[in-house]
Amino acid sequence: METLKKLQAGILICVANIRNMRKKIGLYSINGLRNGVNGLKKGILAIVAFCIMFLMASICSAHWMPESEMYVGGIGPGCTMSYVESIYGEPTHRNWFNTDGVRGVTYNYGNEFFVTGRTWSNDRMTKENDLPVVGYRLLANNLSTPSGFTVGVPIKTVAGMYGWGRKFQYRGKLGYTYEFPYERSMTFYVDSYGNINEIALGTDF
């Protein structure tokens, strides 16, 4: 009889332990579920925040400048060096180059306007007059773009008309680049007051 009572007491203890374990498991499961939900919420919020930041960065660097604005004094992509000379005459200096797989020449007009034409080094057929214009640098306010952008104009004037270009620094110079199809870009360098002190066009083959 005593043995039976002990057995019953042992069974009751086991049942009580099982119930406690079930409660703990249930609690852990609920907490695990809550933690999982909270983790999912945090993950979604992080993704949303990243998307907003990416969108804002895209908006800040977006522009709607037309390709026609790439021309300064009528010179830009599609022109030839003979056309440049027909408008501005004999350059002050001609600087030839043949390096890195390309050859060409830069016309220097009074150290204020530099126009570069080039072709591939293995292209022996294209003469100087027929070299396509691939870039220029304007350092004075005697020429301008179709919208009147020139040296001395505040960069805010450009941004107010066409949006902000991509901001960057190069060799201590601050510039805003407006990119176009076919790896062409137009850069407005500015001084410490935010006024344009150089306009540069860069293109690729």
Image (spheres, rainbow, N blue to C red):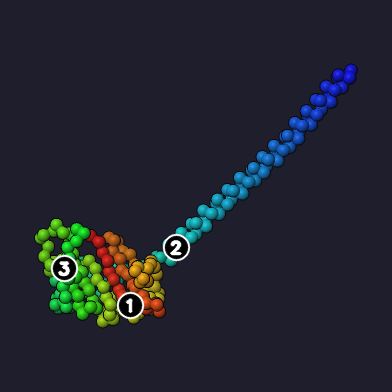
Instruction: Please tell me how crowded label 2 is: few (under 14), some (14-19), or many (20+) other residues with Cα within 10 Å.
Output: few
Q: Amino acid at mark 3?
A: Trp
Number of numbered callouts drawn: 3
Q: Residue furthest right?
A: 1
Q: Position of residue 25 (x, y in %)?
A: 69, 37
Q: Is residue 194 left or right of residue 146?
A: right
Tell me if 56 is positioned left or right of 121 in this view: right
Identity of the amino acid at label 1?
Answer: Asn
Numbered disc 3: secondary structure: strand
Residue 119's disc number: none
Task: Decide if residue 40 is on the left or right side of residue 170.
Answer: right
Crowding near the residue tagged with mark 3, few <14, some 14–19, many ≥20 C-alpha atoms within 10 Å = some
Observer able to see residue 121: yes
Residue furthest to the front: 171
Nearer-the-camera pick, 146 or 124? 124
Q: What residue would you read off at disc 3? A: 96
Q: Earlier in the sequence, mark 3 or mark 2?
A: 2
Q: CA distance from mark 1 to mark 3?
A: 26 Å
Residue 152 placement (x, y as % from top left): 34, 81
Q: CA distance from mark 3 to mark 2?
A: 40 Å
Q: Do labels 2 and 1 touch, CB within 8 Å? A: no
> What mark, if any, has residue 197 been given in the picture?
1
* Label 1: which secondary element: strand
The residue drawn where x is 35% and y is 79% is: 153
Q: Nearer the viewer, residue 168 or 125?
A: 168
In the image, 164: left or right of 128?
Answer: right
Instruction: Report which residue position mark 2 lands on.
Output: 57
Which of the image's four quarters has the C terminus? bottom left
